[in-house]
Each structure stands twice: as C-alpha cells, then as structure tokens.
Image (tube, helix red, strand yellow):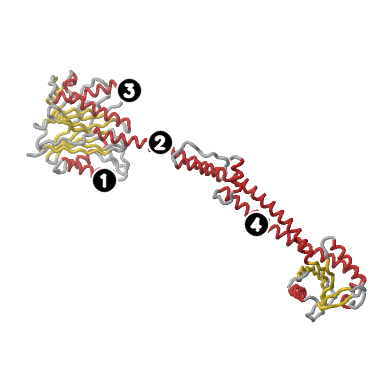
Amino acid sequence: MKSAEHVKSYCRFWKPSVARRVTFYFFIFGLVVFFITSMLYMGGTRKHFIRSTSQLINHQFSLMDSAQMPDFLWQGIGKPNPELDQLFQILTNLSASFYIVSDIAIYAREAGDSLWYRMFFDDNKVLHLNPAQSSFSQKLDRNLERHFVKPGLLARSTDEHALFVNVTGENDLNTYFLKIGIDSENFAGIMKREAKWIVLIFIIALVLSRFLGYYFARKIARPIENLSEISANVAKGDLNHLAPVYSGDEIGELSTNFNKMVEGLREWESVKKIEFELEKGREIQREFLPSQIPNLPNWDIATCFFPAGQVSGDFYDVFMLPDGNVGLVIADVCDKGVGSALYMALFRSLIRVFAEQAIHCSGPNLTQIQSAPGNIETVSPPANDPLARLGAVASTNNYIAHIHGRECMFATLFFGVLNPSTGTLSYVNGGHEPLYVINAGSIKDRLKPTGPAVGLMPDIVFKTQEIQLEPGDLLVGYTDGVIDARSPEDEIYTRARLQSLLTQPFKSASETLERVKTNLFAFIDIAARGDDVTMLAVQRAAV
C-alpha cells in the first residue's frame, strides 16, 4: 500500500473494514484503559495525599508537650499556645510551596454535643472559639458516622476547599479535626494546570492508540483483505490465484483451507468439463443408434438400451438393406468408458457400410455355411445373398485387427440378416451371448457363437448359420450387462433368471423386454450398475 493510501486509510474512521473496525476497538480500549488508569491514579494520589498529610500532622501533634493532657486543645481556649501556633506556621509554610493556604484552624465538638466549633489564633496568638460552617460540619458528621472513620477528608464549600485531618487523641473526650483551607480560585488554578497536563496526555494517548491500533489492525487485516480480494476473483470464475499464507495461526489456517477449496474448485471445474464432453459424447453416441425401428408387416421389433455411464460400449442396430432384408445387430465392445464408446461407433459404422456394399465383402473365408450339424460347405454366394451381407463381420474384423490392432480392442457381436417375407435368418455370432428363439413358453433354439470376438486378430473364419423363424417365434438378444447384474447383496442376476422370464407367456416383443427390464432393475435396486444393459427382441406375428 502506498503512503498516500495509508494516510487516507488512517484518517477514515467511518469506512467499514476489518482494519478500521479493529483500529476502532483498539482506540476505544486504549481510551477506557487511559480513563480507568487516570481515575485510579487520581484516586490513589488523593488517598496518598490525605494519608501522608494525616501522618505528618499527627506526628507533629505527638511531639507537643501539652498533647499528653486530655482535651488540651479545648482547655487551651482563651490562652496562648505557642506550640500549636508554631505547628500552624510550619504547615502554612510547607503548603505554600504547593498551594496558597487560606485558613488553618481546629474544628472541635464536645462529647454529647452536636455543634461544631472553629478554634483559631488571633493576632496575639490566643486561641479562640467560634461556631463552624454548617457545610463542613455536616461532612465531618458523616465521616464520623461511618463504621471505618477515615484519618482525613477533603471537603468543599462555596469559597474554599479544605483538608480535614483527625487529630483526636486517645485520651480526648471531645473530637478534633485540623483544617487546612485552600482558596477556591487558587485551587481551580491548580486544577486547570493539572487539567492541561491531563488533556495533553489524553491527546498523546489518543494519537498513540490510533497509530498502534492502525498498525496492528493492518497486520491482522492484510491477510484477510488479500483473501477477500482473491475470493472475489474466485467468485467471478478466476481460479488462477491462491491466497498467501503468512502465519500458522487461525488466519493462516483459513488461507490454507481457502487454497484447498480453490484446488477443489479447479478439480471440480475439470470434472465438469469432462462431464460436459461426456454428455456431448453421449448425445453423439445416441445418434449412432437407430432413431426409428423399421416397421415391417407381421413383425414386432423392440429394443432396450441403458448405459451404465455417460457413454456406452454396447450398441444395437436395426436397418434395412438394399435388397429388402433387415440387418439386426447387438454388440458389446470390450472395456468401458470413452475408448469403448469410440470403438462402438466404429464397429457400428463398419458393419453398416460393409453390409450395404456386400459385393466388396466376398472372399474365400466368408463363404463357409453349416447346412447341417457337422457338415460345412464352401459356397460362393452372389453379392445380394444374405450370406454375402454377413461377410461384413469378417471385413470389420480385418479392418480393426490391421488398423487398430495395437489397442487390442474387440467386440462380441451378433449380426443377422432377416428376410421378412420368408422368416429366414442368416447370422454370424462373433463370441456374443447366445440369442434365444422362444415359442409356446419354451426355448426353441439358442444361437450360440459361430466364431471368436470380432477384432482379436486378422483373417479369422466366421461361420454363418441360418434358421427359420416361424409365426409366433420370438428372437431375444442381450449383452452380459443383463445376466451379470448384481443386487445390493452382491447376488448375480444369472442367465437362469433371464430364461425364466423369457419363457413366460407374452403378447409382443415390447412386452417381453419391458417385463425383463422391470424385473432386472428391481433386482439391482440401489446397487451400482457395473455394465451397460442392452436387449433386442424380434417377434414374428402368429398366423
């Protein structure tokens, strides 16, 4: 902070800030301490003055020869008393060095009498007696009425201030007070001189307390002001600055915790960016899934897709081929997350492209067909034959293995070509879970793998098989996220539980998948889903 700013901040009492508030508290505290100290000092000085003067006067009285006689003062009325007169002179001369004495006398009261008298010397050094002022008399009475009688007291009348010292002896029956009177104007002058010093000390204390308060407030408030400035930037989204840690006290701990919060916000911002990108990826991935399922006469096709995270490695596809057949795909790419989601898009696109351009997919390793159990024939299908369409699996496998072999990414994949007119389904199952053909409450057939997972290595032979879907048949495919799902008690859903649901009576493919989905998610309940859930069902209407 520059010097000019320090001066401005020093002079601003009214601006709200921690530094000024601490300074104000320090200032008030200094004034209170100064006031209390001054009062204690003045009270102590007054008591010391009365006590010391009383001791001095009583000591002088004790040295007088006549003081050994009881009530020698009362008995000396109308008589000269050189010793007492000399004591009066000594006290007058001693007091004159500090203040002007206007009167020295003895105030006396006889035992059993309530009237006070003033004893004084005339010009001939003879002791005389007169009634005392009523104001002083009342003050002396009050002093004597107290349980602990003070050795002396300061009293005031209209025209003078007086110090009364109790000089009553042990053998005296009457009560005696020595009065030293001070002229009020003189006493006021003394007080004014003392007041000047008090005002000067007050001003010095005021400036000093303000300066000390400002100094310590700046030391306390500087870290808070820095923290406030940085927090304002953080509130605006600037996370590039951290609060400096000056000490290991509460303020230093606050700065440390604030820096931890900023680090957490940075991480949270990074996570939000990642989540935003994942959400975009999820939207893009959903575009790869068919937005509409082909509506075929006498056929009911239903799908179910629930990713475990923002993006998924599972996918399904239902698409029309140029020859009027329908391509059916359900697949599960290995691993999870963004990588598997990218390969999901690649697998899906390759299958579609190679299946629609079947003329480019023919080759010696694509033409093996199992026409009967244990009997494999090698044929050369024409480009528009379903078997040629299934060559898309081998072409996809070779592309992945050759181009992306270093990533070791593969997918379990079922690809079938359905002739909606005849119900003939030609398919390749590349390491995927068996698909079920169900009719009349029982499992009619299982479409087991006809080759390994797609993308493991180049030039793999994928056998093709063919089945006939009769009226009323239901084909159901799923990924391992269904049968491997776990309950909160860590129980596995199992393939047997899925089969028991699929063999129950059904009206449509959609109803079957809805039944399985409801039961599956009730089984999972609050447990975390570790894998994607994808299902595909195709039903041929009964005649």
Alpha carbon distance from label 1 to label 2: 34 Å
The residue singled out by tag 3 in the image is: 406
Q: Do the CB atoms of the residues marked 1 and 4 lie less than 8 Å apart? A: no
Q: Do the CB atoms of the residues marked 1 and 2 lie less than 8 Å apart? A: no
The residue singled out by tag 4 in the image is: 32
Residue at position x 68%, y 58% from top?
Answer: 35
- Lateral position of residue 415 relative to residue 16, left or right: left
Alpha carbon distance from label 4 to label 3: 82 Å
Q: Residues within 10 Å of mark 1 (few under 14, many from 20)?
A: few
**Closer to the N terminus: mark 1 or mark 4?**
4
Amino acid at pointer 3? Arg
* Front position among marks 1 and 4: 4
The residue singled out by tag 1 in the image is: 522
**Closer to the N terminus: mark 4 or mark 3?**
4
Q: Position of residue 96 (x, y in %)?
A: 85, 62
Q: Position of residue 450 (x, y in %)?
A: 19, 27
The residue singled out by tag 2 in the image is: 270
